[in-house]
Amino acid sequence: MTNEQKAVLRKIIYAVETGGQVYGQQDYSDFTEAYENNSDEHAITIGAGAWYATEAKTLLERIYDADPEQWEKIDKVRLLEQVQTANWECFNISRVSQLADTIIALISSKIGVKCQDSLMDEQLATYADEALKQGVTDARAQAMCVNFRHQGGQGAVTRILAKTQKPYTLDNLYAACQTDTGNQVGVYKDRQRFVYNALKTYFPEKLDEGFCISDERDDMFQKVRIRA
């Protein structure tokens, strides 16, 4: 996956997680309590990419490692001790708490935003490689699999691929996910429609590794909303 493809896909994933399905929008300071999204989520979710449970812990660890001095200036409630010792599979704190305020201050800091983008880009590359190993060679199809993987785990990708008519194309994957009745991917039809349309509109099938989105294009993208 090229740098340009990762940049576009990151915007798409951020949009469906915390950006209100508006391409180019995200909420780096997002904090969601356990059970707020659904009854199966037993821990907090944080950041633009909606990192849940142990992934939230990973993000906070990266922020600490990137700038321990900044962390110490912000953390007045011994959050670091919680990061190091608590069970993050069920780490649940109130949004109205000093711990939550500290987490939000850290993830929305300049270093926090940089760590979020870095973590997301690493995950996108890893998930795309997983899809490739499962026989998905088309770039946009890989990106759709990344969306499934980020939302529902590797099991979701495997399940959708088993329903997909070959070759594995974006259109065929989108058709297959519409039949995912009763599962997380299939339930969120607006999300899948948005991702499908955004990939059709913005995602480059092949670009040079060094190509970057211009500020002018970024500004234009942020004003465009794909309607469900």
Image: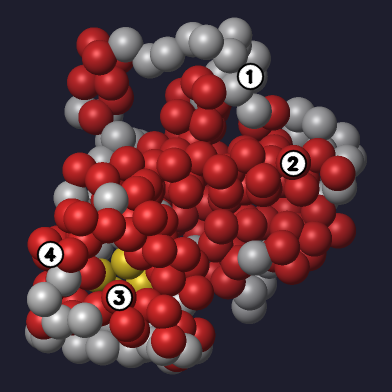
Of residue 70 and residue 7, the one placed in the foreground of this image is 70
Q: Judging from the image, what secondary structure is the residue with disc 3 in?
A: helix
Specify which label sits upstream in the sequence, 1 or 4. Answer: 4
Q: Nearer the viewer, mark 3 or mark 2?
A: 3
Q: Which residue is mark 1?
A: 205
Mark 4–mark 3 CB contact (< 8 Å): no
Specify which label sits upstream in the sequence, 3 or 2. Answer: 3
Q: Which residue is mark 3?
A: 80
Q: Nearer the viewer, mark 3 or mark 1?
A: 3
Structural distance between the alpha carbons of marks 1 and 4: 42 Å
Q: Which mark is residue 129?
A: 2
Q: Which mark is residue 74?
A: 4
Q: Residue at x 36, y 64 (%)?
A: 60
Q: Nearer the viewer, mark 4 or mark 2?
A: 4
Q: What's the residue type where badge 3 is placed?
A: Leu
Structural distance between the alpha carbons of marks 4 and 2: 37 Å
Image x and y of residue 199, in percent: 53, 32
Specify which label sits upstream in the sequence, 1 or 2. Answer: 2
Specify which label sits upstream in the sequence, 3 or 1. Answer: 3
Mark 1 neighbour density, 10 Å: few (under 14) some (14–19) many (20 or more): some
Mark 3–mark 1 CB contact (< 8 Å): no
Q: Is residue 52 visible?
A: no
Q: Judging from the image, what secondary structure is the residue with disc 1 in?
A: loop
Q: Residue at x 32, y 82 (%)?
A: 81
Structural distance between the alpha carbons of marks 4 and 3: 11 Å
Structural distance between the alpha carbons of marks 3 and 1: 42 Å
Image x and y of residue 64, in percent: 33, 59
Q: What's the residue type where badge 4 is placed?
A: Ile
